[in-house]
Image (cartoon, rainbow, N blue to C red):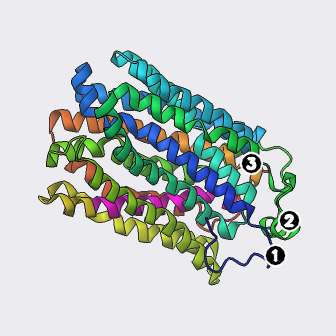
Amino acid sequence: MQPPSGTHAPAGATRYRWLVVTLLFTAMVINYVDRQTVSLLKPTLQSAFGWSELDYADLVFWFQFAYALSYLAFGKIVDRFGARIGFSLAFVIWQAAHICHAAMSSLKDAIIARVFLGIGEGGAFPGGVKAVSEWFPKSERAFAVGLFNAGTNIGAIVTPLVIPAITLTFGWQAAFIFTGAVGLLWLPVWWLVYRRPREHKKVNALELSHIEQDPVVTVEKVSWGRVIRARETWGYALGKFLIDPIWWMFLFWLPDFLHKRYGLDLKTFGPPLVAIYLLSDIGSVGGGWLSSQFIKRGWSVNAARKVTMLICAALALPVGVAAMADNLWVAVAIIGVATAAHQGFSANLYTLPSDVFPNGAVGSVVGIGGMFGAFGGMAMAKYAGFVLDKIGSYTPIFVYAATGYFLALLAVHLLMPKLEPAKIG
């Protein structure tokens, strides 16, 4: 992966930081294959175990409950032990839990497996954002976050291409075992490759000076108490609370929407889902790239981030009528643009903690925000289960998806009006 046009690293500088992003990208591909397998197999598992819509909503709810608490805990873990150890621990937990899904024989078994998956996956984004804050200057961080976050979309693309083929040939249990075993190959590579820039022998002095170009804000110890008292923490947390449920909804219910609205199944899910998540990838990289370009043209970080987020919010508006589209590919186009807008918005939102907090607090802030995002996802799970069970239409769900980004941007702007350094000590 390469830096954006206009990134002024000195001539002769190594580019090891882009290998770090590549590893994070690959981990997020694995993360989302593991996360989305159940949603793709929803009709199959409902048929096998007799789950209702509310049962499936409970499955999502408990995953997100564990994810919320884990996100908070891993935020502190990565600040304490660094991205190398923190990300490794999270990866081992979630990958083992994913494989254990093959042994489930009831809703209770499924909930237990999802809880442990949530515990592990809760460490992925705190670890990834922490790694970016260690390896990139502010001018490149949104782009770097967008790049590794794009792995989530590739994971969402790989899942409908791989899981149906394995399931139809070997059964649904094999889908968990095979993908889990292959994913484990990532861990030794990460452990061997990742170090902090100053500890890495393959990073030369020119690249190190580029990475460390921003003024250093020194805080000897950053406690949760200090972080929680900062209004910037709550601006980020509210933004996550308002937009994360939208992405969770797409991830966990989109295959079901395509099944119920357009009659798709395991054999036909592939092309529409691939198209949607390819668009998401464009949004993830494009949103980070756009704000980075604004900064390089002399815009303030505040203006660059928020204007990009406003553009993304506007692009998501049409999804409110997606369920009314009679043509499958019209719906796919509308939803694809909305998911792209989400990823562009999210790439910039994820970057805000490293914009305003010292490095020693970034993981904790990301953890708090992720916890609130998961709480929002839990509420969405119950709401979606209720709406689908009682009304049977996705329209009320999509209406919120069309408006949530404006609410999130408003919360961010009110609590972080200038993106000035947070006063935490």
Where is residue 257? Give x, y as percent. Answer: 22, 45
Instruction: Kindly report the distance in space between the C-alpha atoms of the residues bearing marks 1 and 2.
Output: 9 Å
Quadrant location of residue 101? top left
- Labelled pair 1, 2 in contact (Cβ < 8 Å): yes
Taking the image as shown, residue 234 lies to the left or right of residue 87, namely left
Where is residue 327? Give x, y as percent. Answer: 14, 60
Tell which circle, 2 or 3, labels the residue nearer the N-terminal end: 3
Amino acid type of disc 1?
Gly
Q: Which residue is mark 2?
A: 204
Tell which circle, 1 or 2, labels the residue nearer the N-terminal end: 1
- Establish if 193 lies above or below 403: above
Residue nearest the viewer, comparing 389 with 196: 196
Taking the image as shown, residue 277 lies to the left or right of residue 199, namely left
Where is residue 27? Give x, y as percent. Answer: 57, 46
Magenta residues (range): 334-356
Q: Which residue is mark 1?
A: 12
Residue nearest the viewer, comparing 248 with 7: 7
Quadrant location of residue 358? bottom right
Tell which circle, 1 or 3, labels the residue nearer the N-terminal end: 1
Asked if residue 333 shows in the view, the reply is: yes
Q: Secondary structure at mark 2?
A: loop
From this viewpoint, which residue is outermost toward the bottom? 297
Residue nearest the viewer, comparing 392 with 156: 156
| Numbered badge on residue 193 | 3
Taking the image as shown, residue 121 lies to the left or right of residue 37, namely right
Q: Residue at x 66, y 68 (%)?
A: 140
- Establish if 69 lies above or below 111: below
Q: Secondary structure at mark 1?
A: loop
Amino acid type of disc 3?
Val
Asked if residue 403 shows in the view, the reply is: no
Taking the image as shown, residue 190 lies to the left or right of residue 272, namely right
Amino acid type of disc 2?
Asn
